[in-house]
Image: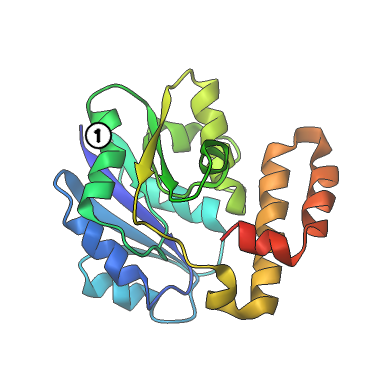
Amino acid sequence: MRVAAVVPAFNEAPRVGAVVRALRATPGIEAVVVVDDGSRDGTADAARLEGAHVVALPQNVGKGGAMLAGVRAVPWADAVVFVDADLSGLTSAHVDALATPLRTGTAEMAVGRLDGWSDAKALRLGGQRAALRSIPLRAPDLGAAGYGAEVALTRQARASGGRTVLVPLPGVASPYKARKYGLSGAFALGTRMRWDVARTTGGGLWPLWAALAVAAGVAGAEALS
């Protein structure tokens, strides 16, 4: 099985290099693709410095669109490992643990569970996952899903009859959004995240779900970090 790694990234110059190093140190990962989603900082340069192939999008298309662009950049791959660009504590052992269930044929998608996350939260929001390449390619709403990308992937895996397993990722952390963007930025991002997740999840009722998501406020931004 040929495996590539895809990292959607927006303004992650200070953090993406460490993620790329962990991915490139993982045996069996044949390529690391960082999709620079219209960043305004040095994300692309930082990724190239560590040996990643960079797909530079001219404007921001959202997380789902960036993930799909990365998948299309590796047409030879049988499976793709998706990793967020802002992680700390990621090692090659974590990456290998995500890819192993696909290599051994025990699952079609593996979802990483960070410390303190419930299984349900990981399945719904976990950005660290490995999947057969056919799953993101066939997910009908992935390109427009934004931060609902993980919901779109989980839904497609289920619809195709694929098996999904959860993989603990001890020691891996995603920074609180307030520390990255400040309180006002975290509020805006948290609202956007909930909006995208609600829109992708809710079907015909998504406007109601989105309204409830927006009402969650600042506490919601922290919960999604």
Above or below for 178 versus 137:
below
Q: Nearer the viewer, residue 168 or 147?
A: 168
Residue drawn 27% across the image and 22% down it: 105
Would you identify the image quadrant in which residue 137 lies? top left
Would you identify the image quadrant in which residue 187 lies? bottom right
Above or below for 137 versus 197:
above
Q: Nearer the viewer, residue 3 or 23?
A: 23
The answer to whether residue 77 is seen in the rendering is no
Q: Nearer the viewer, residue 17 or 178?
A: 178
Residue 46 picture location, percent across and down: 31, 76
The answer to whether residue 129 is seen in the rendering is yes
For this orientation, the residue located farthest to the front is 116
Above or below for 107 versus 13:
above
Judged from the image, the secondary structure of the residue bearing numbered disc 1 is helix
Residue 116 picture location, percent across and down: 49, 50
Q: How is the image coloured?
A: rainbow
Label 1 sits on residue: 100
Judge from the rendering whether residue 104 lies leftward or rightward of residue 123; answer left or right. Answer: left
Residue 71 picture location, percent across and down: 38, 46
Residue drawn 83% across the image and 37% down it: 205
Judge from the rendering whether residue 194 lies leftward or rightward of residue 128; answer left or right. Answer: right
Question: The N terminus appears in which quarter of the rendering?
Answer: top left
Identity of the amino acid at label 1?
Answer: Thr
For this orientation, the residue located farthest to the top is 161
Residue drawn 53% across the image and 50% down it: 64
Residue 221 picture location, percent across and down: 66, 63
Number of numbered discs visible in the structure rendering: 1
